[in-house]
Image (cartoon, grey):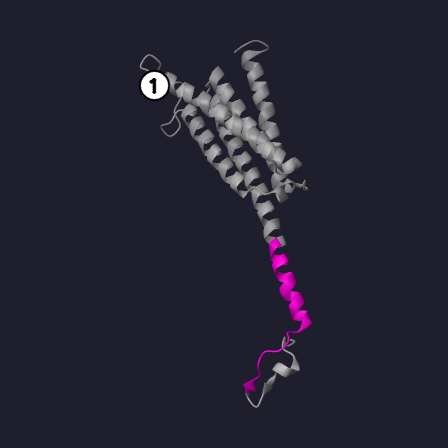
């Protein structure tokens, strides 16, 4: 390994002389090293945010898949408020997918935020309906909690997660990037379940009101 000290700094009779000039190659390394690490940290932060966006979209689609399982295998027909909550979850996932496809943007987060707030409001409305004695619980509970109760929890967790994403946001994330396999998988899953939601809603309601 090349010494970073000039000959004047080499040992003489076992003693190290006073510091002199540093090697120009070492000065260049000291100047470039922080910039290299800054670029790497920035690159890794963008990858982390995009991965978290894709992961959150998949989690929401997992919740929707559980709702479809209850509908088709447990024969629980969703109510109109349930359909609105499904639409809210799809809206949250859509904003996240727009981050993956077009680059991370505050507008895309705003779409997810508004969808989560509206969805939680509908879920809370349904919860208040069934708190009253004259309104028995709707549907079979999952782990002791109704589906609309789980829906309210999911929307609340989505709002918290989106808030954390906003703390991680930086303008460097806005650049459009190519999607990896995991991000494409999340997008296909969201599109597939969205199509299923459209077909199931049409099957239940047709062209009229539910």
Q: Quadrant of residue 132?
A: top left
Q: Which residue is mark 1?
A: 131
* Image quadrant in which the N terminus is located: bottom right
Q: Residue furthest bottom?
A: 13
Please tell me which residue is depicted at 61% across the width and 83% down the height of the picture.
10
Q: Quadrant of residue 95?
A: top right
Foreground residue among 198 and 87 = 87
Crowdedness of circle 1 by 10 Å Cα count: few (<14), some, many (20+)?
few
Q: Residue furthest left?
A: 133
- Above or below, comparing residue 62 to residue 86 in the picture: below
Foreground residue among 131 and 210 = 131
Residue segment shown in magenta: 15-38
The majority secondary structure of the magenta stretch comes to helix
Spot occupied by residue 152 in the image (x, y as percentages of width and height): 43, 27
Q: Residue furthest top?
A: 208
On the question of residue 90 being in view, the answer is: yes
């Amino acid at each position: 390994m090349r010494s970073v000290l000039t000959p004047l700094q080499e040992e003489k009779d076992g003693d190290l002389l006073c510091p002199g000039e540093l090697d120009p190659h070492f000065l260049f390394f000291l100047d470039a090293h922080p910039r290299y690490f800054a670029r790497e940290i920035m690159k890794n932060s963008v990858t982390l945010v995009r991965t978290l966006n894709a992961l959150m979209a998949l989690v929401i689609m997992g919740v929707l898949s559980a709702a479809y399982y209850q509908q088709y295998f447990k024969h629980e027909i969703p109510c109109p408020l349930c359909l609105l909550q499904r639409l809210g979850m799809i809206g949250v996932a859509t904003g996240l997918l727009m981050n993956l496809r077009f680059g991370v943007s505050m507008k895309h987060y705003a779409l997810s935020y508004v969808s989560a707030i509206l969805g939680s409001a509908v879920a809370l409305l349904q919860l208040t309906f069934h708190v009253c004695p004259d309104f028995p619980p709707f549907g079979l509970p999952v782990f002791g909690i109704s589906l609309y109760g789980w829906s309210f929890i999911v929307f609340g967790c989505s709002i918290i997660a989106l808030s954390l994403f906003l703390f991680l946001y930086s303008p460097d994330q806005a650049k459009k990037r190519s999607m990896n396999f995991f991000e494409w998988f999340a997008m296909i899953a969201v599109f597939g379940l969205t199509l299923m939601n459209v077909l199931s809603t049409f099957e239940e309601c047709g062209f009229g009101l539910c």
